[in-house]
C-alpha cells in the first residue's frame, strides 16, 4: 500500500492538469474546493506550486494564468475568481493548511528585483526580514540561488509578482484599469490583513510559524561581515519580551500583516539605478549615520559598554550590509543597468498601497499615539498591542525609503506626457497623509483646510519627499507642453497641494533643522544601543525634542542622498529663480492657448458655410475639430483656468511680489505678438542644419514659434490627400514614371539650354519652389538632387478640384458646339500660351 500512497500526489496533480484543459472555470474551482477539504496537506503539497502558476501565471511570463489584471466585473468569471481568491476563500484556506506544516517552496533569486538579486548574487544579505534564514549559499557559486518561502510567503510573492510580469493585452481589453480583479484583490487583501478597525482575523488552522519564537540563529557556515544581529521582525522583538506571549492571539497573527506588506514593498518598489546603489553603499553615509547615532546616545552614559551594532531592522538608514567591495563584481553592474520601466497600472497599484497605509497608520488609537514607549513606567507596565505598534511605524520603517527611490526613478524616466498623472498622484497621496484620517469634511472646509500641527513631524521626517521631488517636478514642468489641459492640470495640482496653509512653514522649519550645526559631544566614548530586548526602543530617543528631530531629519536626508549631497533649499534663491522661470512659461502657455482659441473660433465661423458642401480646407477642419480634443476650445478654456490658479498658488507658496509678477507678465505679453509668433524658433547653424537652443525648445514647446513644416521628399510620393482620387494618383504616377524613365535624358538636355526654349522647358518640367523649400531644413543630397531633376508630373490631374474644372470646361465647349478633341487642343494651346507669358514675365522681372 506504500507505493500507491507515494504515487497518489502525482496522480492527483496529473488529473488536475488534465481537467484544467477540458473543464470550465466554475467546475474546476468546485473540484478544487472539494480536493482542498478531502486531501491532507501532504498530498496537496506538490499541487500548490502548480496551482500558483495556473492562477497567477508563471514567473517567466510564458503562462498567463487567469489574467487577473484584465479580468473585469463585466466578465462572467469575475465573481468566481473573486470568491476563490478572497482572504477567506478556498485558496487562502489551502495556504493556511499548508502553513500548519513545515513545507517550503523555492523561488529563484533571478526573479527578485534587480538590486536585491544583484546584492544576493554578490554575496550580500539584504537588510529585509523576508530574506533572513531563507538563503543557502551553495559552494559552487551564487548564480543558482533559491529563496525558500513558506506557503503564505510563496502565495504573496506570486500574487505581487503577477503585476510585474509582462503580458500582452487580450483583444478588447485596456490596461491600467482600477476595476480589474487584480486591483480589487490588492485592495481586499490590504483591508483584511491591515485593518483600520479591529484586528486581523485568526487563521482557521493552528500554525507553528504563527506563534512567536525567538529568531533562529544564522548558520555558522555563512558569515556576513559587519552584519548585526537582526530579527525577522521589528515587532517580534516587542512581542517576544512580553510577560505572556501565548496569551495574546494578535501576537500570533501579526506576522501575516508584516509578510504581506514586506512582500508588496520588496517586489513593487525595490527598483533603482546603479548610481543610487553606489550612493546607498557609500561608506561615508554609514559613517555619518553612525556619528549621529553616537551623538544621540549622550544621555545614555550609564549604559555598559557593548560592541557597536546597528539597531534591529534599521532598513530606513541603510539598505544593505556589504560583504564584498562593489568593484569586485563586474557582473553586478550589468544586472543593475537593466532598464526598469514601471507601467501606469503598476503605479496605480502602488498609489492604492500608499493610500491604505496612511489610513491604516492614522487609525492608531490616540492613547497609543501619545504614549511614550521610551518612558520607563510605560515600558514596564503597559505594552501596546502588536497591531497598534505596527501602525505607528509602518510608513516610516517599511515604505519611506523604497517609495522615495521608486518615485525618483519615475520622475526621471517617465515620458513628458499626460500619463505622468499616475506618478504625480501617487506622490501627492504620500505627502498628504492627513487626507486619509477618516475624518469627514464638506467641500468648503476641504478647500481651505489647514494642515494640522500634529503632522509636522511627518513632514520633517519625509523632507526629501517634499523638497527634492518638487525640484525634480519643476524640471519636468518647464519642459512640458502646458498648453495641453492635462499637463496644465498637473502643474495646478502640485501648486494647490503645496499652497495648503501651514505646509510651506513646516517644510521651511524642516530645512532649518537639517541645516543646524552638527551636535558634537564633548566626551565622545564608544557606546552601543539599547535594543528592545534590553529595555530600550529604536523608535524613540532620550534626547531633547529638538535634538531628536535634528537627528531624524539629518539621518533621513543622508540615508537617501549620501553624506556628500548638495542640498538645495526649496525656498532658496536658486529654486526661486527656477519658479520664476516656470511662471514665465505658464504665462507664455496662457497666451498661446488664447491665440489658438481665437484662431479656432475664427476658422470655425469662416469655414462653417463651406463645410456644408464639404469644400472647406481639410487641414483646417482637422486642426481644431479632429481627433485631438486637447486642442478644442473647451480644453483651451480649461488650460487657461488651470494655469491662472497655478500662478496664484505659486505666488502664495513662494511669497512672490504680485506687482513684480504683473510687470513680468505684462512685459512678456507685449513682446509676444502675432508677428513674433510666426518667426522661426531660436536656433544656431550646425554642420547638418539648424540646431535648437534652450530658448528655442521652450518657444517650440509652448507654441510661441514654430517651423514652417513642409514636405521635402519626392513630391510624387506625398501621402494621398482627402481631396485626391487614390486610383488616379497611383495610375498617373505609373504613367509619369514611364515617361520620365523613357525621356528623362531629353528633358534634362532641354532644361539645360540657356536660351528661351530651355527656360520654357524649366517652367513646365521643374518645381521652381523646390530649392527654397530644401533650404528650410537639412535634407540629404540624393533627395535634393532627385527633387531638382526635370520630370513630368501628372499628379495635379488627380485632384477633385482639377477634375471639376475640366468637367466644367468640356461642358462649356459642348455648349459652344466644340467636340472633345477641339476642347483638348484648345486647352493645350491655352496652357502653352500661359507658359510663354509667364516665361516672358519672369525675364522682364529679372531684367528690372
Image (tube, helix red, strand yellow):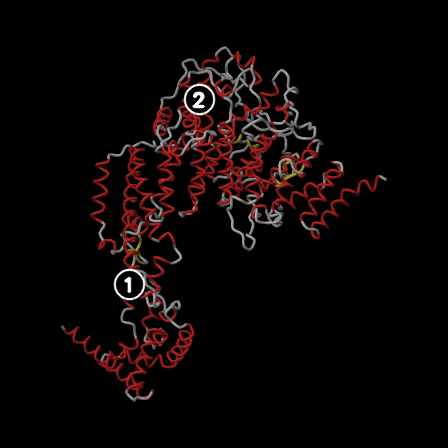
Pick the front one: 490 or 297: 490
Q: Where is residue 773 in the image (x, y as percent from the top left)?
A: 29, 65
Element carrying mark 2: helix
Question: With respect to residue 724, does 463 lie above or below?
Answer: above
Q: Position of residue 229 (x, y in %)?
A: 58, 24
Q: Which mark is residue 649?
A: none
Q: Which of 668 and 448 is in front in this view?
A: 448
Q: Is mark 1 on a helix, strand or loop?
A: loop
Residue beneath disc 1: 775
Mark 2 Cα shell of 10 Å, populated few (<14), some (14-19), many (≥20): some
Q: Can residue 683 be seen in this view?
A: no
Residue 391, image x, y percentages: 53, 26
Residue 216 appears in the figure: yes
Quarter of the image with the C terminus is bottom left
Residue 619 placement: quadrant: bottom left
Q: Where is residue 282 in the image (x, y as percent from the top left)?
A: 46, 31
Residue at 27 percent of width and 71 percent of height: 768
Q: Earlier in the sequence, mark 2 or mark 1?
A: 2
In this view, the residue farthest toward the right is 1
Query: With 388 as the anchor, is 768 left or right in this view?
Result: left
- At 46% from the left edge and 13% from the top edge, which residue is drawn? 299
Q: Name the residue under label 2.
A: 292
Q: Is residue 350 left or right of residue 822?
A: right
Q: Are marks 2 and 1 in contact (CB under 8 Å)?
A: no
Quadrant of the frame with the N terminus = top right
Amino acid at each position: 500500500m506504500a507505493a500507491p500512497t507515494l504515487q497518489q500526489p502525482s496522480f492527483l496533480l496529473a488529473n488536475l492538469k488534465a481537467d484544467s484543459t477540458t473543464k470550465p472555470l466554475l467546475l474546476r474551482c468546485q473540484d478544487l474546493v472539494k480536493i482542498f477539504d478531502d486531501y491532507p496537506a501532504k498530498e496537496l503539497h506538490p499541487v500548490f506550486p502548480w496551482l500558483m502558476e495556473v492562477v497567477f501565471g508563471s514567473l517567466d511570463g510564458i503562462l498567463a494564468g487567469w489574467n487577473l489584471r484584465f479580468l473585469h466585473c463585466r466578465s462572467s468569471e469575475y465573481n468566481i475568481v473573486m470568491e476563490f481568491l478572497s482572504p477567506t476563500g478556498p485558496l487562502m484556506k489551502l495556504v493556511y493548511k499548508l502553513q500548519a506544516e513545515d513545507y517550503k517552496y523555492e523561488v529563484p533569486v533571478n526573479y527578485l528585483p534587480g538590486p536585491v538579486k544583484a546584492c544576493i548574487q554578490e554575496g550580500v544579505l539584504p537588510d529585509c526580514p523576508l530574506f533572513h534564514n531563507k538563503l543557502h549559499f551553495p559552494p559552487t557559486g551564487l548564480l543558482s540561488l533559491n529563496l525558500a518561502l513558506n506557503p503564505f510567503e510563496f502565495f504573496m510573492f506570486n500574487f505581487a509578482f503577477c503585476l510585474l510580469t509582462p503580458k500582452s493585452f487580450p483583444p478588447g481589453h485596456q490596461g491600467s484599469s482600477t476595476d480589474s480583479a487584480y486591483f480589487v484583490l490588492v485592495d481586499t487583501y490590504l483591508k483584511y490583513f491591515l485593518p483600520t478597525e479591529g484586528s486581523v482575523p485568526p487563521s482557521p488552522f493552528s500554525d507553528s510559524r504563527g506563534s512567536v519564537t525567538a529568531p533562529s540563529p544564522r548558520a555558522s557556515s555563512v558569515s556576513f561581515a559587519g552584519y548585526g544581529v537582526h530579527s525577522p521582525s521589528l515587532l517580534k522583538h516587542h512581542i517576544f519580551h512580553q510577560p505572556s506571549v501565548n496569551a495574546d492571539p494578535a501576537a500570533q497573527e501579526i506576522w501575516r500583516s508584516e509578510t504581506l506588506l514586506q512582500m508588496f514593498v520588496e517586489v513593487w518598489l525595490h527598483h533603482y539605478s546603479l548610481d543610487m546603489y553606489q550612493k546607498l553603499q557609500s561608506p561615508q553615509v554609514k559613517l555619518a549615520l553612525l556619528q549621529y547615532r553616537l551623538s544621540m546616545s549622550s544621555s545614555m552614559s550609564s549604559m555598559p559598554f557593548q560592541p557597536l551594532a546597528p539597531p534591529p531592522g534599521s532598513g530606513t538608514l541603510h539598505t544593505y550590509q556589504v560583504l564584498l567591495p562593489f568593484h569586485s563584481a563586474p557582473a553586478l553592474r550589468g544586472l543593475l543597468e537593466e532598464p526598469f520601466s514601471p507601467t501606469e497600472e503598476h503605479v496605480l497599484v502602488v498609489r492604492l498601497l500608499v493610500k491604505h497605509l496612511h489610513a491604516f497608520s492614522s487609525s492608531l488609537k490616540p492613547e497609543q499615539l501619545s504614549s511614550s514607549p521610551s518612558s520607563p513606567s510605560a515600558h514596564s507596565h503597559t505594552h501596546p498591542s502588536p497591531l497598534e505598534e505596527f501602525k505607528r511605524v509602518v510608513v516610516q520603517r517599511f515604505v519611506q525609503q523604497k517609495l522615495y527611490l521608486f518615485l525618483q526613478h519615475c520622475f526621471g524616466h517617465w515620458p513628458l506626457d499626460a500619463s505622468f498623472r499616475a506618478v504625480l498622484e501617487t506622490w501627492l497621496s504620500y505627502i498628504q497623509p492627513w487626507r486619509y484620517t477618516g475624518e469627514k469634511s464638506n467641500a468648503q472646509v476641504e478647500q481651505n483646510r489647514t494642515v494640522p500641527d500634529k503632522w509636522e513631524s511627518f513632514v520633517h521626517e519625509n523632507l526629501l519627499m517634499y523638497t527634492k521631488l518638487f525640484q525634480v517636478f519643476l524640471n519636468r514642468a518647464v519642459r512640458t507642453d502646458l498648453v495641453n489641459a492635462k499637463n496644465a492640470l498637473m502643474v495646478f495640482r502640485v501648486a494647490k497641494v503645496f499652497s495648503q496653509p501651514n505646509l510651506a512653514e513646516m517644510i521651511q522649519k524642516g530645512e532649518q533643522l537639517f541645516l543646524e550645526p552638527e551636535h558634537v559631544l564633548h566626551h565622545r566614548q564608544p557606546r552601543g544601543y539599547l535594543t528592545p530586548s534590553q529595555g530600550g526602543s529604536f523608535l524613540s530617543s532620550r534626547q531633547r525634542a529638538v535634538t531628536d528631530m535634528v537627528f531624524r531629519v539629518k539621518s533621513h536626508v543622508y540615508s537617501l542622498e549620501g553624506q556628500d549631497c548638495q542640498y538645495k533649499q526649496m525656498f532658496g534663491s536658486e529654486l526661486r529663480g527656477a519658479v520664476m522661470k516656470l511662471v514665465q512659461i505658464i504665462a507664455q502657455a496662457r497666451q498661446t492657448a488664447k491665440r489658438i482659441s481665437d484662431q479656432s473660433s475664427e476658422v470655425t465661423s469662416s469655414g462653417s458655410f463651406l463645410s456644408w458642401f464639404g469644400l472647406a480646407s481639410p487641414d483646417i477642419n482637422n486642426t481644431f475639430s479632429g481627433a485631438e480634443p486637447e486642442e478644442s476650445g473647451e480644453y483651451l478654456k480649461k488650460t487657461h483656468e488651470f494655469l491662472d490658479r497655478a500662478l496664484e498658488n505659486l505666488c502664495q507658496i513662494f511669497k512672490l511680489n504680485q506687482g513684480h509678477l504683473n510687470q513680468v507678465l505684462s512685459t512678456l505679453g507685449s513682446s509676444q505678438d502675432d508677428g513674433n509668433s510666426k518667426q522661426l524658433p531660436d536656433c544656431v547653424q550646425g554642420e547638418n542644419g539648424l540646431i535648437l537652443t534652450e530658448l528655442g525648445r521652450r518657444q517650440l514647446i509652448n507654441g510661441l514659434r514654430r517651423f514652417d513644416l513642409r514636405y521635402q521628399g519626392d513630391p510624387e510620393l506625398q501621402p494621398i490627400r482627402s481631396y485626391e482620387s487614390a486610383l488616379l494618383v497611383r495610375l498617373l504616377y505609373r504613367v509619369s514614371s514611364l515617361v520620365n524613365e523613357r525621356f528623362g535624358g531629353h528633358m534634362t538636355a532641354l532644361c539645360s539650354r540657356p536660351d528661351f526654349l530651355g527656360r520654357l522647358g524649366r517652367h513646365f518640367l521643374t518645381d521652381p519652389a523646390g530649392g527654397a523649400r530644401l533650404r528650410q531644413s537639412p535634407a540629404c543630397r540624393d533627395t535634393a538632387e532627385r527633387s531638382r531633376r526635370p520630370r513630368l508630373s501628372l499628379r495635379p490631374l488627380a485632384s477633385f478640384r482639377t477634375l471639376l474644372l475640366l468637367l466644367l470646361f468640356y461642358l462649356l465647349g459642348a455648349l459652344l458646339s466644340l467636340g472633345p478633341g477641339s476642347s483638348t487642343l484648345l486647352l493645350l494651346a491655352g496652357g502653352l500660351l500661359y507658359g510663354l507669358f509667364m516665361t516672358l514675365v519672369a525675364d522682364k522681372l529679372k531684367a528690372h
